[in-house]
Image (cartoon, rainbow, N blue to C red):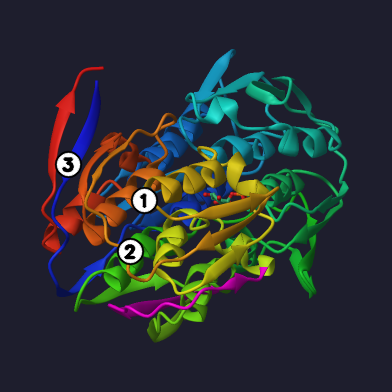
Amino acid sequence: MTSYIFINRKINSYKKKIEVTSDKSISIRCILLASLAVGISRISNLLESEDVLNSLKAIKKLGIDYKKKKNFFEIKGLGLNGYKPKKNTIINAGNSGTLARCIIGICAKIKNQIKIVGDKSLSKRDFSRVTEPLKNFGLKIKSKNGFLPVQIQGSNFLRPIKFLENKGSAQIKTSLIFCGLNTPGTTIIRAKKSRNHTELLLKNLKIPIKVKSKGNYDDIEIRGLNQFKAFNYDVPGDISSASFFIVLTLLSKKSELLIKKVNINKTRLGIIKILNMMNAKIKLQNKRFYKGEEIADIFVKSKNNFKSINCPSSLNSSAIDELLLIICLVSAKAKGISIFKDLGELNKKESKRLDIAIKFLKMIGIKTVRKKDNIKVYGNPNLKLSGKYDVRNFLKDHRVFMMSTVAALTLGGDWKIHDKNSIKTSFPKFLNILDKLGAKINWKKEKI
Ligand code: S3P
């Protein structure tokens, strides 16, 4: 059974305040860290999406209890080295690369072998990027040529490593930091800058971690084997989920939107910087800090004179989930040719997002030129659609579904967009919020 939505009307103008769903990266990290802490952690506003629920199921399989209370989850951590998985435990990470990659690092000491599996999309993604450096700690890891299923056998004789992470991947960095927590001595990672929620959480938990910024890299040192106490955390809104509503508002007529309580950590702010360089004039209001993370309300208004951009690739990592997907809609409407470079990592996501964005732009009549991982988008400020569009999304990528929905609601035309269920991965309330803004969307289920 698959499901699709049908849209044949642009969204009318609106002036609203909304809250988007809680941050997925922070939710998953809180669960994994709470499972390693000593005592009961309380996490409020945890994102209740499939990736996060799979993270809860994963720690349960490692012998960690959790309970849902009113608006928070209680997780009963058993400390470093506290996991007790049964023999032949299988952890299904579903669609989540973050969960699958980070849990390998966190299982550094487990005695029984465990196996990590995932869905069709995750099974096509490379795991050697984490398994190879993790093997240097002394973990025994087997995989199918770098792909799932991955089997892990922990070790009591871990040794710290020195590693250069140069993809700008927070998943690799986090997996290695987690392994470093269980390893005697000091693990040293020079990592190309990427989202830093793990480092901020650890600093907040008073775990000995040092981070020194050096140009586009961070030098990270983590001293292992320090037990830490359970903690409370209130998860802020996810800027990657907010990005769909930011672009929806920019591209719709005479609308204004205030998105409350969103994480604007500078390692995630690429989307705002890129859109503002294109003349979006998005404002961050009521800025405040919470446990090292910067939070704000985002104010955005409709616009119709976007400039093209020569996007500095130093912004790629901080907009990794927005490139080129939701951003391609704004470059499609911009005056002139937008240039995006070094986008190779995008084809290693839930689906091949660079290929998909180019195909999508072609479908809506926008010329693109690709040279290796660099792309030029020939914008058309007068872009208006009237044809029929059918979006099938083979690997059911949640962000491809949401980007297509925003295109349908702002550019015109008759759209059938498949794989509605994919939003459960990160943003189950996506369609409910669109409904609140007045979008007319019909949805149906069909057998395939
Ligand atoms: C994430 C890191 C990013 C991002 C993913 C979430 C994380 O992946 O695309 O959605 O929570 O660490 P990479 O680290 O592989 O770039």
Q: Which residue is mark 1?
A: 364
Which amino acid type is shown beneath numbered disc 2?
A: Leu
Magenta part of the chain: 292-312
Nearer-the-camera pick, 348 or 108: 348
Spatial distance from mark 3 to mark 1, Cα to Cα? 17 Å
Q: Residue at x 30, y 62 (%)?
A: 20
Pick the front one: 435 or 248: 248
**From what the image shows, is residue 120 above or below residue 270?**
above
Residue placed at 86% from the left, 46% from the top? 160
Asked if residue 384 lies left or right of residue 439, the reply is right
Q: Earlier in the sequence, mark 3 or mark 1?
A: 3
Query: Is 253 included in the stretch rendered in magenta?
Result: no
Numbered circle sitting on residue 418: none
Identify residue type, mark 3: Phe
Query: In the rendered image, which residue does mark 2 sit on?
Result: 383
CB-based contact (under 8 Å), mark 2 and mark 1: yes
What is the x, y in percent for residue 205? Answer: 60, 63
Q: Which residue is mark 3?
A: 6
Q: CA distance from mark 2 to mark 1?
A: 9 Å
Q: Position of residue 417 (x, y in %)?
A: 27, 39
What's the residue type where badge 1 is placed?
A: Ile
Mark 2 vs mark 3, CA separation in Å = 21 Å
Q: Which label's residue is closer to the chain start, 2 or 3?
A: 3
